[in-house]
Image (tube, rainbow, N blue to C red):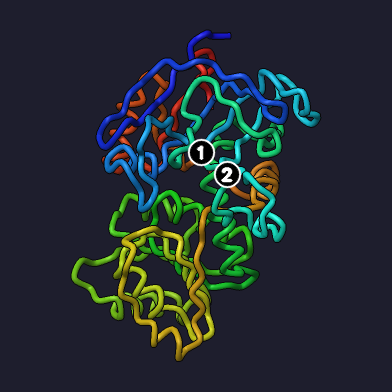
Amino acid sequence: MDKENLSVVVHSKGDLRLEHRAVPEPGPNEVLLQMHSVGICGSDVHYWQHGRIGDFVVKEPMVLGHEASGRVIKVGSEVKHLQPGDRVAVEPGVPREMDEFFKTGRYNLSPTIFFCATPPDDGNLCRYYTHSADFCYKLPDTVSYEEGALIEPLSVGIHACRRAQVTLGSAVLICGAGPIGLVCLLVAKSMGASLVVISDLNVDRLAKAKELGADFLLQVKRGETPEEMAKRVEEHLGSQPHITIECTGVESSIQTAIYATRSGGVVVVVGMGPAMVTVPLLSAGIREVDIRGVFRYCNTWPMAIAMLASKKVNVKPLVTHRFPLEKAAEAFETTRQGLGVKVMLKCDPNDQNP
């Protein structure tokens, strides 16, 4: 095992570095992982470019990365269900206490939760990383490391579709065809949605959505009002959607989501935008359109692994770029420029395979 632990560290706004850190020792209930594949998320780029997301501010150097998979190389004294050699996917959010949210199964809402690459908690974009064994999930042989890393964004789609109550025959509008919009598309289809229309400004992303099974594509036109956009949605579907999953965080897109959704339907807000946005709340209120929030996910890894192992969902086309860990700066710049869909960093110098 290496004595040095190459890590991608953000120090402050605009200051991203590759550093050698010590290889950590696992605690009694932890495992030491040799990281294999780690995806770059928009939040990683945001911390690099802005030094903060909302109230979460980078005050000390922080290792980035939270979409991850790796191989167990050492287990803590109390760990019984994992052993060295096991391939695992990492759920990055680990509750620190058994509070009311933990007890009711909504541990993602716990205010004290540990979460990889959210200040002050270090992430796992590095060679070696320790994590709670209970939040490392063994991967079947038929699921690759990259698929394991993609369980994290896939989990956002699962949680969003659960919150939206997507079911057999649902007609769904997805606003935004970035990585999260695309996983929402995959999950909605696998949960039985009969029609899915997806919107975006970018024609390349819409083409990827078509490849992944979207029924209708809507290119957003600059200058078009939210009401006009909502009308186009209805024209494509033949009726208003039961459910809209908003993945952009853009004010006009949230407005479109509310106008487009049929009376009695559901709007799920996944995208994170400004702290304050103007929305047609009266339209939602008098039509009984429920607006539901989504914050990360909970209890999704077992379902995601089952979906991938059964081949009901194929996330492989999402990975468009791969870089060795040493080229992290180039990988981050690729993501910042919005090139491709998902950029994957390969952390094991002896195994750069998917």
Q: In the picture, residue 337 is in which quadrant?
A: top left
Q: Position of residue 248 (x, y in %)?
A: 36, 59
Residue nearest the observer in this picture, 207 or 342: 342
Determine whether the residue tagged by mark 1 lies in a helix, strand or loop: loop
Question: In the displayed structure, does residue 8 sit left or right of residue 348?
Answer: left
Q: Residue furthest left?
A: 223
Q: Residue furthest bottom?
A: 286
Of pointers 1 and 2, the one earlier in the residue sequence: 2
Q: Residue at (51%, 73%) from the top-left corner?
A: 243
**Label drawn at residue 116:** 1
Residue nearest the observer in this picture, 97 or 255: 97
Q: Are marks 1 and 2 in contact (CB under 8 Å)?
A: yes
Q: Residue at (68%, 37%) from the top-left corner?
A: 137
Q: Amino acid at mark 2?
A: Gly
Q: Position of residue 225 (x, y in %)?
A: 25, 76
Q: Position of residue 247 (x, y in %)?
A: 41, 60
Q: Amino acid at mark 1?
A: Cys
Q: Position of residue 353 (x, y in %)?
A: 53, 23
Q: Residue at (56%, 69%) from the top-left corner?
A: 164
Q: Quadrant of the N terminus?
A: top right
Q: How many numbered marks have been drawn onto this rendered protein structure?
A: 2
Q: Residues within 10 Å of mark 1 (few under 14, many from 20)?
A: many
